[in-house]
Amino acid sequence: MTQRCDEGAPLQIISIFDPDDNRIRDYRAIRERDLTRHDHFIAEGEVVLRVLIRSKLCRPVSVMVVENRLEGLLPQLDGLEPGVVVYRVSQAVIDSVVGFSVHRGILALGRRVTIPEPSDLLDRLAPSGLVIALFGIANHDNMGGIFRNAAAFGAMGIVLDSTCCDPLYRKAIRVSVGGTLVMPFARFDKADDPLSILEREGYEPIALTPRGDETLAQLRCSGRVAVLLGSEGPGLPPAILARSRTVTIPMAGGFDSLNVATTSGIVLHHLTQAG
């Protein structure tokens, strides 16, 4: 049974009492193993919802809110476009629908508005600036951390090879604090040669590796730059390193391992903030 509230107001709020109500089927059983489907995704938490509402790259389709969080969320929800429904539910209903306890009590179904090809994305970016190119990043925490750093330090976009995990996976969105919803990104096809595409669009490839030919402190760049990052452990493929300018971050005591998301933050700070 449902009840329509706030008649006449632009904000559509519908109370849902039955976890099997078909109108909230897209929220059903969204466990960590579930991937995005048809470029729709699940976002959670107040901060991420705020980013989603303001994003130019993604749009909210609907919102589900635990009843005791709704009143405090109303000023934010006023920014929703017409037609976006807010489902008001109890904690018991949201736990039953989702399949685990959601203590934030705020979920949103979103969709990606534009899905550019890598060459199109790279071509329309500024003539001077940097992008990040990711190879084999399969960990959603690392993916979210990289997007968070990219948004914080003003990277222009991110391109991913075909083996990278989905930036719109719920955990990646959460770790990025919504960065994956505002940072332009595109994915190369398996048959693509990412470096050829980057170079054709005028980007100098800068590959991070413990065995780099120069240190980060020595690195000076101009024009379009692509920072290349690989998975932890294997790192970037040898074929990629052989065709790139290789850079290392010196570490104390011969230690040569940094988390890839941490690496992205250090490099982006150096390239965008250092004098």
Image (cartoon, grey):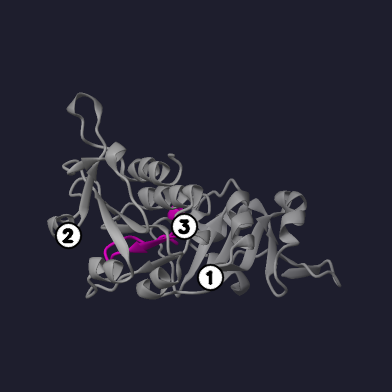
Q: Is residue 204 visible?
A: yes
Q: Quadrant of the N terminus?
A: bottom right
Look at the image and say whether residue 51 sits in the magenta stretch. Answer: no
The magenta-colored residue range is 156-172
Q: Are marks 3 and 1 in contact (CB under 8 Å)?
A: no
**Mark 2 surroundings: few (<14), some (14-19) or many (≥20) residues within 10 A:** few
Asked if residue 170 lies in the magenta stretch, the reply is yes
Say whether residue 16 is visible.
Answer: no
**Residue 111: assigned label:** 1
The residue positioned 33% from the left and 42% from the top of the image is 263
Compare marks 3 and 1 and give the one earlier in the sequence.
1
Q: Which mark is residue 170?
A: 3
Gap between marks 3 and 1 measured at Cα: 12 Å
Which three-letter amino acid code belongs to the residue tagged 3? Arg
Picture residue at 54% right of the left edge, 48% below the top: 101
Sequence-wise, the earlier of marks 3 and 2 is 3
Query: Which quadrant of the view contains residue 118?
Result: bottom left
Q: In the rendering, which numbered label is found on residue 236?
A: none
Horizontal arrangement in the rendering, residue 31 relative to residue 76 (left or right): left
Q: Which label lies toward us, 1 or 2?
A: 2
Residue 259: image location, x then y, percent: 31, 41
Residue pushed farthest right? 8
- Whole-Å distance between the Cαs marked 1 and 2? 36 Å
Report the residue that reaches farthest toward the top.
253
Q: Quick one: label 3, few (<14), some, or many (20+) residues within 10 Å?
A: many
Eye-nearest disc, 3 or 1: 1
Q: Is residue 128 left or right of residue 100?
A: left
**Which residue position is annotated with label 2?**
243
Q: How far across and how far down the image is residue 54, in percent?
A: 63, 61
Q: Earlier in the sequence, mark 1 or mark 2?
A: 1
**Figure quadrant of the C terminus:** top left
Position of 130 with respect to 71 (left or right) is: left
